[in-house]
Amino acid sequence: MAILPGWNSPAAAGSIAHSLHIAAMIVLAVLVVAEGMALVYDDRKYALIGAAERDVTATYDEERREAEGRHHNDIAKLQRRLEETQRQQASRGLTFSDQQTLVAALSPFPGQHLDITSVLGDPEAQQFAKDFAFIAL
């Protein structure tokens, strides 16, 4: 061990030992500060992750609400269209004036044979056929 500086001198060995103790305490103090900073930055990291997750959740919820709103609007439009179509279809039938016109048109041909046919599975055509049959009787 004679190759170390100040190995054989009591004053130099004491001074070097003292300096190494001071260096060890400084390194220990830097280590404590570094660990404290690591804890602070870990807390900050988790806080940022939580904020990012809340932002993602809020964005997802907002997109979901917007999609539900669009779907609700689409459904409302379709329901209005369905109601309009149903009103139009409900009015499709022989009115009283239509029935009178048919009676007047058929009156010059009493006793004639009349065949009334309709497409099978078409309720509207079958309803018209029933209406015609009722008038023709």
Image: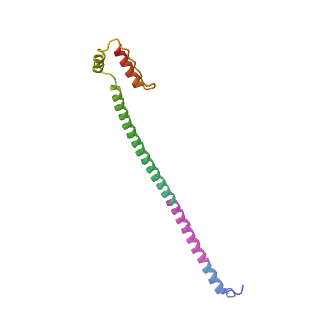
Residue 123 position, x and y percent, is 42, 24
The picture quadrant where one finds residue 80 is top left
Residue 118 position, x and y percent, is 42, 23
Please indicate whether residue 35 sits to the left or right of residue 59 in the image: right
Q: Is residue 68 above or below residue 42?
A: above
The answer to whether residue 14 is magenta is no
Name the image quarter holding the N terminus: bottom right
Residue at 38% x, 36% y: name it. Answer: 78
By what rule are the colours in the image chosen? rainbow
Please indicate whether residue 98 sits to the left or right of residue 70 in the image: left
Q: How many marks?
A: 0
Name the image quarter holding the C terminus: top left
Residue 115 position, x and y percent, is 40, 18
Q: Main secondary structure of the magenta part?
A: helix
Q: Is residue 14 above or below residue 38?
A: below
Seen from the viewer's position, the closer of residues 108 and 119 is: 108
Seen from the viewer's position, the closer of residues 12 and 45 is: 45
The answer to whether residue 30 is magenta is yes
The picture quadrant where one finds residue 21 is bottom right
Residue at 64% x, 80% y: name it. Answer: 17
Residue 129 position, x and y percent, is 39, 20
Q: Is residue 11 above or below residue 66?
A: below
Residue at the right extreme, as displayed: 1
The boundaries of the magenta stretch are 21-44
The picture quadrant where one finds residue 95 is top left
Seen from the viewer's position, the closer of residues 135 and 60 is: 135
Residue at the top extreme, as displayed: 111
